[in-house]
Amino acid sequence: MREAAPGILPTIPFDRRSKVPFHRQIYEAYRRAILEGRLRPGQRLPSTRGLSAELQISRMPVLNAFDQLLHEGYLEGRVGSGTYVKEGIPDDLGRPAEVRQTRTPPGTRTRHAPRPIRSAGDDVPPDWALLGPFRASQPALDEFPRIIWGRLVSANARNLPVELMAYGDPAGYFPLREAIAQYLRTARAVRCEADDVLIVSGSQMALQLAARSLLSPGDAVCVEEPGYRGARDALRAAGAALVPIALDEEGIDVQAIQSRGRGARLTYVTPSHQYPLGTSMSASRRLDLLEWAERNDAWILEDDYDSEYRYASRPLGALQGMGDHSRVIYLGTFSKVLFPALRVAYVVAPPELRGGLLRLREAMDIFSPTLYQVVLTDFLRDGHFARHIRRMRAIYLARRNALVESLREQVGEALAIRGADGGLHLAAFLPAEVDDRMVVRLAAEHGIAAAPLSECYAGPASRGGLILGFGGTPEHEIPSAVQRLAQAIHAVI
Ligand SMILES: Cc1ncc(COP(=O)(O)O)c(C=O)c1O
């Protein structure tokens, strides 16, 4: 539905001392703005009253100009809802060639069209970034309790106290920090109080903050190999020299950190559910890593991105809660457990780092939008969050089972499944020598959004594979989607 708000006044050249009559100047200015694409089809124009007030002239020349534009088909009037730029303008005379090429054809709506989401290479958007079944990191957006959320958003938007419309605390809205601290202590065994929690706009921001405040260019940082590309990117952007460390079934190899990562200032890990392989780090490995950090005055960056969902056993407590938490920076996000476009995540950092993180956060974007922090606080406090997690566990378990079963039936031995015990994705190794990018590209042609495992390696991948998200794919769509994926796999192997 169109908004009822008045259109924005475009900047138009207007010279009250010119010999050109006012109505002609207005007509020309609007015509050019439309032809050059500065005013787009469907865009609402300001009212004639508003425009005449802005230009400080009588309404008559404005009415004349608009009449002519309406008559020539540049504009259209809708009863009771104002004047709009016509969908499909009459000619493109007078429009520069480059504008003609880049304009959207009349009637084409691009705003919500599916499009590549992120690029895997440095500049080329890859095929596997398309929306489609098995997209990694996608929660069940179709199951999100929109009615409850919508009610909370609209009630809070209507009643937001004026002080919450002003600049907010860079550390976040305090009641939300309290609610998160309570959740983390209870569900994740994190040691924290509300004061320790810093709200950020997504864990990607948290990774940037941690990297920039802890590292100097050239500092060695150990990362899981394979691991999360978003973390590698943030660490590299802060000048880190990455040291990829192999994993085994207990998690990151701490002995290798000690030998190959000598002098490292930081190790980035996903202990609860390793991204992408899905291993959970054993208790003894966690203790070894904590000891390494203690002994070397180094830091551990713990990314706890999707630990709410375990299907075989209860979720494991966080690494942060195992030690005296003085060397661990803990990150969590609402991107998986609620939805990624919310852009709310949190950091729990040792006291000595907090001031630096906060100053940097303030320098980046001052604070996160208050309205959604308030909404989220209500969502947590009123029990909707806990209910949502409980409900989603059953749904994700069904989706996971459908995927594993379909893969076994339709692809069989060609895929070795890993890490299906938790989270929203699984990893599946392809036979040695098979190029996973080729499989992914072919699968994308069938509308499947798998990601190649090789993308998760900082160095050369030891073996290709696929990352298959099941969180965002409804259970009944899984068998036919696997069938299309199987075609792509069988075409390559
Ligand atoms: C390992 C890991 N950490 C964090 C995130 C979430 O990041 P954000 O909170 O920026 O959406 C993801 C999402 O894909 C992830 O895979």
Image (tube, rainbow, N blue to C red):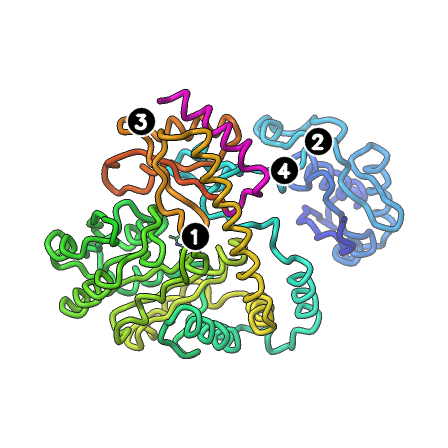
**Disc 1 on helix, strand or loop?**
loop
Q: CA distance from mark 4 to mark 3?
A: 37 Å
Mark 2 vs mark 1: give the one in front: 1
Say what secondary structure mark 3 lies in.
loop
Q: Determine whether 172 is above or below 390 in the image.
A: below
For the magenta stretch, what is the residue range?
A: 471-493
Q: What is the three-letter code of the residue carrying label 3? A: Val
Which residue does the numbered mark 2 point to in the structure image?
A: 106
Q: Amino acid at mark 2?
A: Pro
Mark with earlier residue (3, 1): 1
Q: CA distance from mark 2 to mark 1?
A: 43 Å
Question: Pointer 4 and pointer 2: residues touching (CB < 8 Å)?
Answer: no
Residue 72 on image: x %, y %? 83, 32
- In front: label 2 or label 3: 3
Label 3 belongs to which residue?
434
226 to the left or right of 398: left
| Foreground residue among 135 and 421 | 421
Q: Which residue is mark 4?
A: 110
Residue located beneath label 1 in the image: 423
Q: Where in the figure is residue 420, as x and y percent of width and height?
A: 40, 47
At 65% from the left and 57% from the top, the residue drawn is 146
Left/right placement of residue 285 relative to residue 174 reads left
- Mark 4: give few (<14), some (14-19) or many (20+) Cα within 10 Å: few
